[in-house]
C-alpha cells in the first residue's frame, strides 16, 4: 500500500486543532487523528467539527476503548470518524464489539497493543479478532517513567519488524519517535506514519510546536510518500 502520513491532534482546543489540521492538509498529510486529549476536551463535537471542515479526509478517533466498545465506536462513526482505536488489553468481547460496530457503521478498527506483556502476540491477537490495522505503541507515561529512572527509553522500533512480520494488516508505530525514525517506518514495512507528540505537538503543553511547522510537515510528507508502495506482510 502507499504510505500514509497521519497527524495526531493531541491538542485540547478545537480551534487550534482545526488550524493545525488545515496546515497539515496543505502540507500533504493524508489522515487526521482526533487525539485522546482532544476527544477528552471536545468529545463528539470535536470530531463533528473536523468532519465539517475536512469532508473527504479520513479521521482517526483515538478512543483507546477499554469497555462499552459498540456504543463508543458507533458514536464516533456517526460523528464522522472513519477509524476508531481499541486497546489490546481490553476484553476480547470489547474488541469484537468495536469490530462489529465498525462493520455496521463503516469505520475501520485500529487495535493498539500498548502495555501488552508480549507486543507481538498482542498484535497477532488483535488481527485475529478482526482489527483492520495495528497500532504498535509504547506509551507516553511508560517512556517518560522509565527514562526518569535512568534506564533506556523503550521505542516502538525495538520490535517493529517482528510485529510487521506477525500480522497481515498494516501497522503503525507510535511513541516517542524522532522525525527521522518516523520517516523511516515504511522501511520497516509499517506504511502508516504518525506525526504527533513530540514531533509536531509540544509534548508537555499539548500545544502546536513553534517554528516553521508547515514547511517541516511538507518535507516529511514528501519523504514518506516517495517510498512508493510498501509491501504489507502477506499481501
Image: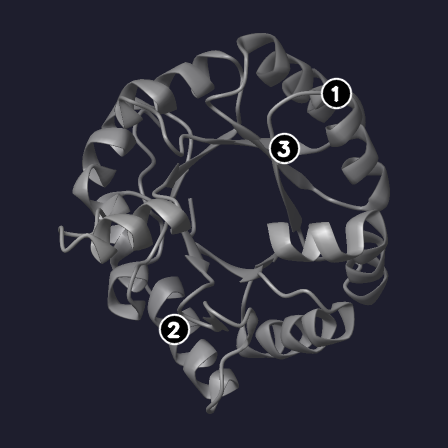
| Picture coordinates of residue 169, whole percent (x, y) | 42, 29
User: Could you say which disc has been placed on residue 70 in the image?
Assistant: 1
| Picture coordinates of residue 186, whole percent (x, y) | 30, 52
Residue under the point 31% across and 24% down: 234
Label 1 and label 2: CA atoms lie apart by 35 Å
Q: Nearer the viewer, residue 187 or 80?
A: 80
Contact between marks 1 and 2 (CB within 8 A): the answer is no
Residue at numbered disc 3? 108
User: Could you say which disc has been placed on residue 170 in the image?
Assistant: none
Residues packed near mark 2 inside 10 Å, few (<14), some (14 to 19) or many (20 plus): many
| Picture coordinates of residue 175, whole percent (x, y) | 36, 51
Label 3 and label 2: CA atoms lie apart by 25 Å
Residue under the point 33% across and 70% down: 223
Considering the numbered disc 1 on the image, is that residue within a helix, a strand or a loop? Answer: helix
Considering the numbered disc 3 on the image, is that residue within a helix, a strand or a loop? Answer: strand
- Does 222 appear above or below 32? below
Residue under the point 40% across and 67% down: 198
As drawn, is 142 to the left or to the right of 25? Answer: left
Q: Nearer the viewer, residue 167 or 222?
A: 167
- Quarter of the image where one finds residue 181: bottom left
Badge nearest the viewer, 1 or 2: 1
Considering the numbered disc 2 on the image, is that residue within a helix, a strand or a loop? Answer: helix
User: Could you say which disc has been placed on residue 220 in the image?
Assistant: 2
Label 1 and label 3: CA atoms lie apart by 13 Å
User: Can I make out residue 3 in this image?
Assistant: no
Amino acid at each position: 500500500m502507499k504510505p500514509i502520513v497521519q497527524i495526531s491532534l493531541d491538542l485540547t482546543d478545537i480551534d487550534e486543532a482545526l488550524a493545525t489540521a488545515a496546515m497539515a492538509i496543505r502540507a500533504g498529510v493524508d489522515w487526521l487523528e482526533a487525539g485522546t486529549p482532544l476527544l477528552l476536551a471536545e468529545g463528539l463535537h470535536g470530531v463533528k467539527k473536523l468532519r465539517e471542515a475536512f469532508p473527504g479526509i479520513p479521521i482517526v478517533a483515538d478512543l483507546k476503548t477499554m469497555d462499552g466498545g459498540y456504543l463508543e465506536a458507533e458514536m464516533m462513526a456517526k460523528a464522522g470518524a472513519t477509524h476508531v482505536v481499541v486497546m489490546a488489553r481490553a476484553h476480547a468481547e470489547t474488541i469484537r464489539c468495536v469490530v462489529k460496530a465498525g462493520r455496521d457503521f463503516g469505520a475501520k478498527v485500529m487495535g493498539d497493543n500498548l502495555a501488552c506483556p508480549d507486543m507481538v502476540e498482542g498484535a497477532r491477537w488483535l488481527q485475529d479478532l478482526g482489527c483492520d490495522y495495528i497500532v504498535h505503541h509504547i506509551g507516553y507515561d511508560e517512556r517518560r517513567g522509565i527514562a526518569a529512572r535512568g534506564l533506556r527509553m523503550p521505542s516502538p522500533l525495538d520490535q517493529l519488524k517482528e510485529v510487521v512480520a506477525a500480522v497481515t494488516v498494516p501497522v503503525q508505530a507510535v511513541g516517542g519517535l524522532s522525525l527521522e525514525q518516523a520517516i523511516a517506518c515504511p522501511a520497516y514495512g509499517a506504511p502508516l506514519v504518525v506525526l504527533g507528540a513530540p514531533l509536531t505537538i509540544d509534548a508537555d503543553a499539548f500545544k502546536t510546536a513553534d517554528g516553521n511547522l508547515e514547511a517541516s510537515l511538507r518535507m516529511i510528507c514528501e519523504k514518506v510518500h516517495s517510498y512508493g508502495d510498501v509491501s504489507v506482510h502477506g499481501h
